[in-house]
Image: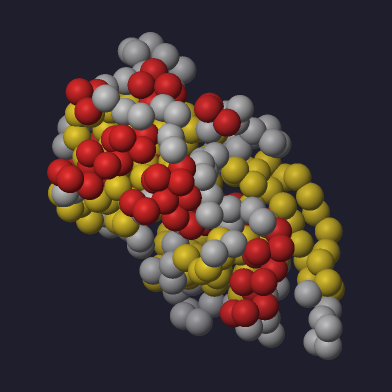
Amino acid sequence: MSGQRQRGFSQVDVFTDTAMLGNPLAVVHDGGGLDTERMAAFARWTNLSETTFLLPPTTPEADYRVRIFTPGGELPFAGHPTLGSCHVWLRAGGQPKRAGTVVQECGIGLVPLRHAERLAFAAPPTTVERADAELLHRVYAALGLDPARVRDAAWLSNGFPQLTLLLDSAATVLALKPDHAALKAHGKVGVVGPHPAGSESDFEVRFFAAAIGINEDPVTGSLNANVAQWLIDTDRAPANYVAAQGTAMGRAGRIHVRRDAEGTWIGGDVAACIAGSVLL
């Protein structure tokens, strides 16, 4: 195709320090000159939950700009693409304007990231709306979930709405066997439940998104950002905790949550998998 050229390309695994145990992400180092249709076509071709394209920022406050695509379209924000894209940008020689902090520009605006022991992004504001009871019972049926196991439910959003259920335990979360075809009509659904005290992780998380072509996402930064704000704000989670996600899929994602005076931070390791170039 005319206009094609070699572009730096990486594939990384996010929310894990061991490749193939987290959530994969494809990153095109230089998206310059690519239109939306071409980016979307490449994202469909990679067939990963997200593919990102790094671009020069359009505002002096940002270090780089990123566009984030699923096989179904573009997202204004997503968590694991934020961490993975920042990791790739730094490894490719990116130099932040302020030491220890990287500022990403994306669809929802500017997202700060801390660059310390592991990368962590500042959780965007979360809106909380109550969920309709009739809808909830349809979702419970699609999940094969006993309503008595549900402790709370709400629509949470930091860019796009996620119906999120707080369940009685991590064991209940892991036992779910959802009907993805039935869930598809109800949007994106997250579930979270506490592990017993003294466990390696504090919470277990799952995310079902057949509505955007992903039956179950291995590890979901945006959902964990929403969950952290919701649970910490309502005193149902400590200011610092670790969540596990992907267990039911044979993954071992770990999300490190920390709240301090500057905000709520969602951190995770990033493992390199593929480095090279793509003709695009």
Residue 115: x %, y % from top left? 53, 49
- The answer to whether residue 105 is above or below residue 27 is below
Work out whether residue 18 or residue 150 is closer to the camera in this orientation and state it: 150
- Counting the numbered discs, the total is 0
* Residue 265 visible to the viewer: no
Q: Who is closer to the viewer here, 60 or 105?
A: 105
Q: Quadrant of the C terminus?
A: bottom right
The N terminus, quarter of image: bottom right
What residue appears at the point 32 percent right and 56 percent down from the top-left corner?
A: 161
Task: Please report the residue visible at 51 percent of the width from the left and 45 percent of the height from the top.
Answer: 215
Q: Residue furthest bottom?
A: 2
Q: In the rendered view, would you say 54 is above or below 270?
A: below
Pick the front one: 142 or 276: 142
Residue 128 pos. (x, y %): 20, 52
| Displayed quadrant of residue 10 | bottom right
Q: Tell whether 35 sits left or right of 181.
A: right
